[in-house]
Amino acid sequence: MDERFTDSAPVVMTIDIGNTAMKVSVFEGDCLLQSVAAPGCDPEAVRTLLMFHHVDGICYCCVGRDSAGIADCLEAEGEIPFLRLTAETPLPIGVEYASRPTLGLDRVAAAVGAAGGETPLLVVDAGTAVTSDLVADGSFLGGNIAPGISLRFKSLHEYTSRLPLVEPQGVTPELGFDTVTAIRAGVVGGLAHEIESISRSLSGRYPGLKVLLAGGDADTLLPILAELEVPCFVDHAVVGRGLARIFNYNRN
């Protein structure tokens, strides 16, 4: 493990507000103590974890809308050291991206959470959008953004006259045998093949590359990628771990 991530083990709360949900977690060093997910933006999740954990600091990341003003409230209270992740926040990894101000903060946090080992990783955060980012040699090296599974299902339903709205859970054959399975095979199976393609391409330049899956649809993609023999694993704590590491890096 990179020594930048192991200097000490304070207890840090992380708040990750996405496009459709938020996750509040508590870490001791890299160890996840507790995590709560909530739809939208729910300050009760923050209050609940603060009741059960004495935290040394809070690191906050928002790519959606903080409709409850959680960050402003925590900063105004001033009782707990608070770090709001921005494009100017110093990071414990390099970022090779031409426009860091436009780089999603959740992508930055996930890259920091994934870094620290020798294995190059393609970090795939499968949420409302799907981001596929390469983390290798202690740096964020760039990535791709594509529509997420729910967006693909909704677009097929809303921009056609007869196609139904399909759920991701269910039989996902290589070739659909009815309209529902054809859509699911095209959407879920198609996304899995996209991830397979980029991972195969990058593995030629980065031997030993593995795919790290996070986000709400990670568990849906995992078995399909495994069938495609893509080396992959799920890590739902990667963004929170990255936020905790960023707080620790900046705490002094």
Image (tube, rainbow, N blue to C red):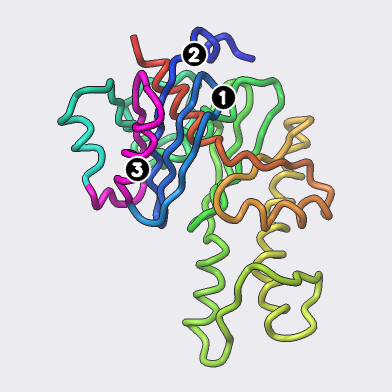
**Which disc number belongs to residue 9?**
2
Q: Which residue is mark 3?
A: 62
Task: Compare residues 143 and 179 and report the one nearer the observer.
Answer: 179
Residue shown at 34% from the left, 34% from the top: 60
Residue shown at 32% from the left, 50% from the top: 42
User: At which x and y percent is residue 111?
Assistant: 53, 32
**Relative to 16, residue 168 above or below:** below
User: At which x and y percent is residue 95?
Assistant: 48, 27
User: What amino acid type should be assigned to the residue bearing mark 1?
Assistant: Cys
User: What amino acid type should be assigned to the residue bearing mark 3?
Assistant: Cys
Q: Quick one: SS at disc 2?
A: loop
**Relative to 174, residue 248 above or below:** above
* Labelled pair 2, 1 in contact (Cβ < 8 Å): yes
The tag earlier along the polypeptide, 1 or 3, is 1
Q: Which residue is mark 1?
A: 31
Tell me the CA gap for discs 2 and 1.
9 Å
How packed is label 2: few (under 14 Cα within 10 Å), some, or many (20 or more)? some
Q: Which segment is the magenta one?
A: 42-68
Dividing the picture into quarters, in which one does residue 200 lie? top right
